[in-house]
Image (cartoon, helix red, strand yellow):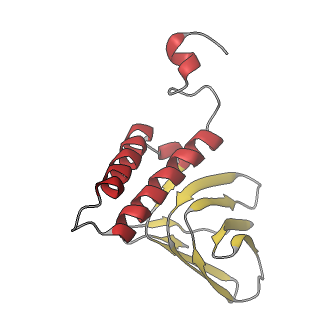
Amino acid sequence: MIVTPNKVVFENWIYSLMLPGELGYLEILSNHAPIMTVIKPGKLVITSKNGQQITYAISHGILEMSSNHCTVLADAIEAISEIDIERARKAVERARRRLESQSIDLNISRAISSLHRAENRLKLYNETLPKFNAYSPEKKTGQSA
């Protein structure tokens, strides 16, 4: 089960779950030993029993595996196919401006966290979706490299 404060994102039987833990990426399979770990921002990949994969951008959270049941509690998670690339770009710019401002009332850890979340969404969008997506310079100009 994958849950955020706003909704249940995924609840079904799967073959495997791969996500970024505190010490690096880990894969959870059926009958995995009990484990609890911190989740870092990165890519979460669910592989169904028929081999189909669903990829998400995940932010901070916690994973708990016990009794052959896995629970992921995440601050935010977004399917790669649903990422609003312009919104993510604007979020990166906004977070960078906040950090550069060095305002007295700036919550630095929150600004850094926002920057990492937005950068993660941009990175995964660019890695995962087809090379010639709607935001490709080649597609906009009609030229190829």
Residue reaching furthest to the top: 142
Tell me what residue is drawn at x 48 percent, y 58 percent: 116
**Total label count?**
0
Q: Is residue 20 left or right of residue 81?
A: right
Q: Identify the residue at image location x=39%, y=70%.
A: 109
The image shows residue 140 at horizontal and vertical percentages of 50, 16
Left or right placement of residue 144 versus residue 62 in this view: right
86 to 99, vertically: above or below: above
Evaluate whether residue 65 shows in this view: no
Above or below, 138 relative to 129: above
Seen from the viewer's position, the closer of residues 53 and 137 is: 137
In the image, 116: left or right of 129? Answer: left
Quarter of the image that includes the C terminus? top right
Residue at 56 percent across and 73 percent down: it is 1
| Relative to 102, 47 lies left or right | right
132 or 119: nearer the viewer: 119
Q: Residue at x 47, y 45 (%)?
A: 83
Q: Position of residue 141 (x, y in %)?
A: 52, 12
Residue 107 or residue 3, whichever sits in front? 107
Question: Residue 37 location in percent, x, y?
Answer: 62, 82
Name the foreground residue: 55 vs 86. Answer: 86
